Amino acid sequence: MRLQTKTTLLITSLVLALGVNAQEQPKAEDLVGKTYVGIHGTRMNTDDDRLTSNNVDFIKHGNGMGAEIGYRYSEKSEYRLSYTHLNLTRVGWAPSTPSGSNIALNYLLFPNKENFYLMAGASALEVIETKLSVNLGAGYRHYISDRSAIYFEGNGHYQLDEAYTDLSAQIGFIYFFGDTQKKIVRAKPAMEAAPVTPAMVKPLDTDNDGVIDSKDLCKATPADNKVDSNGCTVFTEENDAMHLHVKFDNSKAVVKPEYFENIKAAADFLKTYPHTTLEIKGHTSSTGSAAFNKKLSQQRADAITAVLINEFGIKSSRLTAIGMGEEELINPANTAQAHKENRRIEAKVVVNKKVAVKR
């Protein structure tokens, strides 16, 4: 019992010594990556079924003190390794007081990133014999300064081998190491400063768009964009269009090399606007039978589709080939020039896009 009293007095003294500099608790983000060490006092009520070697008396409870080292892994989680020396008290025939220990590795979860935490872990718990034990518990941490805190926690322990259930309460003091926010020391002014009026304070305009932050709904607009009264970029709509024309020889569906640059331009357009599809229409002149022209026009549309897929990597699902035959002549005259103009494929797509207006 004297060991627990000494531990409590030691922690209380540290709390009083640091209490003069007490401040609001540090932000969780400021603790990430920091290591802390601490001391603690523990009270453990053991399972009544824990018999000693003579099987007459049993371990009733234990008091102890120990030390720990922890690491703040993230804003919500910590890892802690601790050692506790236990002075055990037993009931019955008790010529001596046995000792025990607990070496524990725990994970601490801070659901709200603040004082309250849940914990779980595993330990080598020595009560007469050293056995593997798992524990679940909760605690509360009160910060005395931006580096130090006291905590209170309770745990339930379950020893796997013998199915013993023990309960513990713990009070501790911890101190964080590592970089921390520097305190601002305000010098006493030599003379009373003139009062600051609202007219002397320039409103903030973080993105320099001419709209102050308190009225800016879009606080990260590019510097060269024109903005509206809410500080948001002004857009205008523009059209981007692509037209593909390829001519064919009489009664042929072979794509001539001279048109590959035109087809590549169409492929580049499709890659720029991946949400678009392309309908390719094949056409013929009015010479020959209608059935022959229908088949030939389909072959011409398929030929262009094959080039887009095989040469320029456009997915077939984005392409549609339709043979129109001689149904849509662009020149109905019965001349060699007219027939030449009608032997073709046509494809076009128009895209509406928003463009930011510049200042």
Image (cartoon, rainbow, N blue to C red):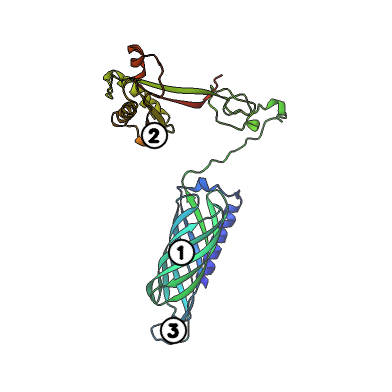
With respect to residue 350, does 28 lie above or below? below
Crowdedness of circle 3 by 10 Å Cα count: few (<14), some, many (20+)?
few
Q: Can you say whether 195 is above or below 19 in the image?
A: above
Q: Which residue does the numbered mark 2 point to in the structure image?
A: 318
Q: Position of residue 28 (x, y in %)?
A: 53, 48
Relative to 156, 192 lies left or right: right
The kind of residue tagged 2 is Arg
Distance from label 3 to label 2 (Cα)?
90 Å
Q: Residue at x 43, y 87 (%)?
A: 56
Q: Give the secondary structure at mark 2.
A: helix
Residue 357 vs residue 338, the one in the foreground = 338
Q: Amino acid at mark 3?
A: Pro
Mark 1 or 3: in front is 1
Q: Secondary structure at mark 3?
A: loop
Q: Position of residue 4 (x, y in %)?
A: 52, 69
Identify residue for label 3: 95
- Name the residue that disc number 1 marks: 66
Q: 177 or 206: nearer the eye?
A: 206
Camera sees residue 103: no
Q: Which of the 4 image quadrants contains residue 289?
A: top left
Going from N to C along the chain, the mark reached first, 1 or 3, is: 1
Q: Secondary structure at mark 1?
A: strand
